[in-house]
Image (spheres, coloured by chain):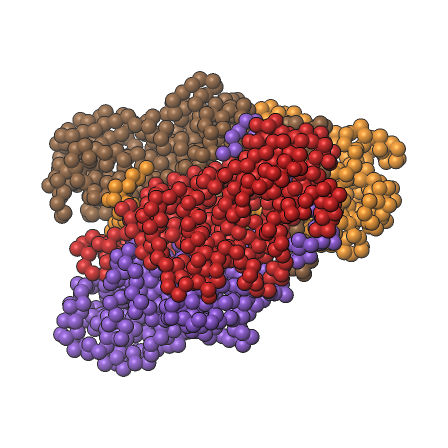
Chain colours: A brown, B orange, C red, D purple
């Protein structure tokens, strides 16, 4: 083993990362610093303190990162109307850069020379954690136990616990699920179990954050979202912080059966995987943001954003948040949001979040021009002839030379 | 007026285009050929014959183009998962190239030197008709009465009818609506009226093709869609022609409140406009196509398609179907669809069309690799380390030279 | 004629724009303000004052805009390695936004309600002037005499001069050329005459800024260019202002036969045209900028710049400098240039500008990693196996399912 | 060592790959099949037979692939005007997919279960060979000796030769160079040695295919290149096969000092490297292809090609020739070349290849429209006003609402 003196571990307090604490101490004969963050996963983080202490950890970091998470990661991402592969709202992907940053910062504070995480060798999260860590601290050593050890079954893990006196009730509640799950303020994800058959419909009792559309209220809920520079700053007129916005929209969306998603996606490591996601608030936010942009954003800027978005989504999905290309894309995106201000009115009903109205003092919609009624000369219809003629010129010349148009 | 001898008019049989027949005859002292097509707008086209005859038209074309429309225009477009500005399924845009092509073909058959249409000088449709016509017959003369005449109010039109003995019952039923509407097998659109205020919610009785989600059945409907090379060829196992597929999906979608859309969009002529659309079948098709691609399409091909899609959508929206750039994009898109075969299972319920399963003999999903269980060596997790290390190399070098990652 | 009270004219002092002064005064019965700028076209601008006075102009603006031109327009454009259609360095295009801005500013200062220019109705320049003017002063009236009048031959212009006592020696020297020319610090262009046959080679005596490669010195010239944040700030160690840099590089390039270009290009108005250009300094700058970026810019940022460049070039060529999409692209480009610092050494010889060396304190080239010699562990070659294996995974899965790779 | 029975080796006949033959036989106790191809590297391939026999190889493949190489790889790539990072013509990259394909085909013919190559663990070539092999034969075992063995210095290799009776004259002439070189019909490359300092100018005696511009003839050479569907089919009117075209252009270019390149490039494995290249024929072909396209290709197709090109270049550079994304891009590119026919006239002189004329029966250049003279009504200048007005509309609306244009 390479010479590691101190390692900062992303520690959930659950069984797996508790085993990792012990395994790191044993295998690398090093000190372990644990880092546990509340990013809205919906479980208490404070209990991780006692568990870490019980494992002999001396430096324990427990932090509430919810506001920073939504303000500095989720919101910038939503400015781009970001969706991966047409469907996925990147709920897991967007949380990793923040964790990576804090792992590195804590390593710098505590003089650690390594970081570690509990992600497997098959998934995207290992890539996201490690690319972030390398980008922020190039000389850091990364330890990924799941790629190194042979504890690759539940049984072996349990035996390891028994041999090392790790209380099995470290196992958190969600571990009883047949699914591999991950949650933060933006979403909860499910993989594994029967989902490994992409033809099998997800079972109703798998979903945790939302009621089924069938069980949602018979009456629609209307909500008004206020945007400032592309970010939601108030709900129904009440000013809220970013994480409060998302939290409330999660509740409203979940109550109305909104935000369930069942997809097969392409992982960066080269395989397809099937995952289910609940993103109630994010689903509402995405549609609302598009709606306010539809009113306030210039056409060509909007189209260019749409052309860049898949690349931006890929950059985040693949783990390159801390990269020059993300910085570059973010600069382009943010340069368009100055006037993306106003209010969007939405209807939430049994699984659907639909836009029913939008208004803005920066609106570029000009009824006096668009109207079917008399426009009092605001628009000269004769201009259209020259517009069409010159746009057609290259096509006409080609056709005139006998080119086939099809 | 320029020297026009015969003009082919896209004739709906309604009041406006009936006025145009007369106006063309008078203004240009020319023969008018009418062309009326069934592209699934949901109204009889045969009555247009008598109306045209009553207006003195001698060459009358009435055609059922539904199959050609869906097979050669709608289906190729859906292979690209095409959406304009993140929302609009291009229902109007995709019908125009076919009309333009037939106008030109009929002009060639009848020896006409001009074509004409009833689109206004403010919209996209004039552009789409005319770009198509110029691309297919570069020397054609185009007459756009709405840009030329002064009959720019309902009252003036009515007076014109009276003066010229045009029976006002030529006015079709849909003209009684306060909205400007357009329909074909893919969608029906609404503009104008109260929609000119983007904050105003559309009235329930405006919608014609779908029940409201609230009024939809309490029980979900499941449907299985079979794809062959990216196109749907069967519903619930029953082989159907393209227009039969779309027709049936329209019914199923409409019955379940699916496919309503309310947006502000950017017109090619430079203004924003607000439109409402019902696209029940198309909404189902789009999600289903993405789902079958998620299983059968290579990741990089899928991502490249996503990057090209906004451009492809813009090309169609702006009226450049008959252009070298559309041909080029179509070649790229079609080159990816050979293995896009299989079945998608969807749940339709109160406004939502959700994917619940997908299967394919060409599936690239490999459970033996993706599994959380023992994969028997199908994937070597240690490969991930080298993968990450080399992907991180450029970031590490930069960080090592003191560059900020953010 | 619409009610124009005062118009600001982009006035060269030459025959054509002198006729325009008179024609505007007569046709619109309005006051004319002339604006003449030195943007490095190589002719005195001060003589324009007397000519304008002789034509009865009272408000005369004559300005030296060379520094602003290079600093705020040319330099930002070169940060993107901008080339239109693979060849053209956009010498004419990039000067127009500055002229448009000054026209509008002068209109605001003088209370003018219109602007005017001497560009024809067939070219790109009318578009660039007018889009800029409309973007900066939306209510401005634009008068484009060449699209309005009937003085569409040299003879008619001469007659007009005679009738209106415009001295024909207003004709500047360059009007004696058989070519239509335009010049500024970035380039000089030639169109028309024998160039209208794209098979005809340009005559040697057409070129004005450069010697022929054959006539250039037998000995190469070496030059070192110092970059700071993507812009050249010194030549051979001597700090220079932007326009001094370009001016000196024009001389060095011209002396060595560098920067001649002969192309057929696609105009925004829909036709192809043939043009010849001399861009001596720009040709050197472009290669040098790429060279310093090759050393200091991250790979993915560089590739993304390359993907965006054609769009950015098109935006400028088409006249959309003053647009949200240009602002957005510029933000992305500028976000990459912080570390584009260092020195490039070039060899200028008989028509070629070749890079022979580059160095930078922000260099990302790491000889200790790239070396063919022993790298002392800086790079672990075994990492490459995992890198390749996972990058190949999607291809292997597809091939394993019988997909053809070709 | 894994159980390898027979391995096909890409064998140059040089010292390194001769050592690999022996090392494979020893290390894997397996049979080695050698494959040596003439792809225009300029050395005899037949001598490789005796060398392989002397090493105990029984199955020896020696093939002339020059025509296939240029026809099926170089030509399709040039249709896209492909350049990597603005400078590099991909001479090495484009040869690898053909070698990979033949390795796999020979493995299938000979029943081999593995392939091997002599590329190092730091470069791009390992990636290109292996991605190709995996894509074409997913279960193949790849052996990359440079990543496995410890013969990582010239001295160790020499010792190995001595111990294993490998005649050192196996060392080919080019090994005496201080540079790492690679050659095929498209180019010759140089890396290593003093080039590892990017500030150091390459020495004149390094270059092998071209004279220096200084030493080139004082008189220019003119050449006419005939294109058919985007490919050169004749030189100065003489029909030639693809590899004959390239071979002759290499000679003409080399004689005139054309095609030298000195760059720092970004490798796929994450590092920057400095390389020098001579691509005499390719440099001429690239400019000529752009010139014939400038005359015959539609503007929007041309611009879309330019936008896709950097991605296409990256795909090839990174080794993904045998991938769905390359197939997709090729389909788009090839769909544009039907009318790219005609003749380009070029002037070759002391390092420069300049276009001086182009003509085509499919020309889209229309002098009657573009002319500065009277166009007899071919183009109505008044159309430009409407064209500009509607293109400006969105900008005017925004400015009218107080938006800043900058």
Q: Is residue C41 above or below residue D125?
A: above
The residue at the point 33 percent across, 46 percent down is C238
* Residue A228 in the image, given as x and y percentages of width and height: 46, 25
Residue B7 seen from this side: yes
Residue depicted at x 33% and y 28%: A68
Locate residue A200 relative to residue B162 in the image: left or right. Answer: left
Question: Total of numbered circles in the picture?
Answer: 0
The structure residue drawn at horizontal position 43% and vertical position 55%, both measured from the top left corner, is: C253
Q: Quadrant of residue C191?
A: bottom right
In the picture provided, is C203 more to the left or to the right than B32?
Answer: left
Q: In this rendering, is residue D260 above or below C94?
A: below
Q: Quadrant of residue D122?
A: bottom left
Q: Residue at x 40, y 35 (%)?
A: A77
Whole-percent x, y for residue B81 in the image: 52, 45
Residue A225 visible = no
Q: Position of residue C220 (x, y in %)?
A: 37, 62
In this rendered view, identify the residue nearer to me: B375 or A376.
A376
Of residue C243 and residue D211, the one placed in the foreground of this image is: C243
């Amino acid at each position: 083993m390479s010479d590691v003196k101190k390692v900062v571990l992303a520690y959930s307090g659950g069984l797996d990362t508790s085993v990792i604490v012990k395994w790191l101490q044993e295998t690398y004969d090093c000190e372990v610093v644990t880092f546990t963050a509340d990013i809205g996963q919906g479980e208490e983080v404070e209990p991780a303190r006692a568990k870490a202490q019980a494992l002999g950890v001396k430096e324990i970091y427990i932090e509430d990162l919810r506001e920073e998470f939504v303000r500095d990661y989720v919101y910038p991402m939503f400015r781009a109307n970001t969706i991966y592969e047409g469907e996925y709202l990147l709920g897991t992907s967007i949380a990793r850069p923040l964790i990576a940053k804090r792992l590195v910062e804590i390593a710098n504070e505590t003089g650690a020379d390594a970081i570690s995480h509990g992600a497997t060798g098959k998934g995207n999260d290992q890539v996201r954690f490690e690319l972030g860590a390398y980008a922020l601290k190039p000389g850091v050593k990364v330890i990924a136990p799941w790629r190194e050890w042979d504890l690759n079954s539940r049984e072996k893990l349990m035996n390891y616990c028994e041999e090392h006196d790790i209380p099995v009730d470290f196992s958190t509640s969600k571990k009883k699920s047949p699914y591999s799950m991950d949650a933060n303020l933006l979403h909860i994800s499910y993989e594994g179990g029967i989902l490994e058959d992409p033809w099998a419909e997800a079972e109703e009792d798998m979903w945790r954050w939302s009621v089924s559309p069938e069980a949602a209220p018979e009456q629609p809920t209307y909500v008004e979202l206020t945007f400032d520079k592309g970010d939601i700053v108030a709900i129904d007129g009440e000013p809220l912080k970013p994480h409060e916005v998302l939290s409330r929209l999660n509740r409203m969306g979940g109550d109305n059966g909104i935000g369930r998603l069942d997809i097969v996606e392409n992982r960066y490591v080269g395989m397809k995987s099937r995952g289910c996601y609940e993103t109630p608030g994010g689903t509402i936010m995405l549609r609302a943001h598009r709606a306010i942009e539809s009113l306030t954003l210039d056409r060509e800027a909007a189209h260019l954003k749409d052309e860049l978005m898949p690349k931006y989504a890929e950059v985040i999905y693949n783990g390159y948040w801390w990269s020059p290309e993300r910085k570059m894309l973010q600069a382009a995106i943010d340069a368009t949001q100055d006037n993306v201000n106003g209010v969007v009115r939405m209807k939430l009903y049994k699984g659907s979040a639909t836009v029913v109205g939008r208004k803005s003092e920066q609106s570029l919609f000009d009824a006096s021009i668009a109207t079917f009624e008399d426009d009092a000369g605001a628009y000269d219809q004769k201009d259209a002839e020259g517009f069409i003629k010159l746009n057609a010129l290259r096509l006409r010349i080609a056709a005139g030379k006998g080119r086939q148009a099809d």
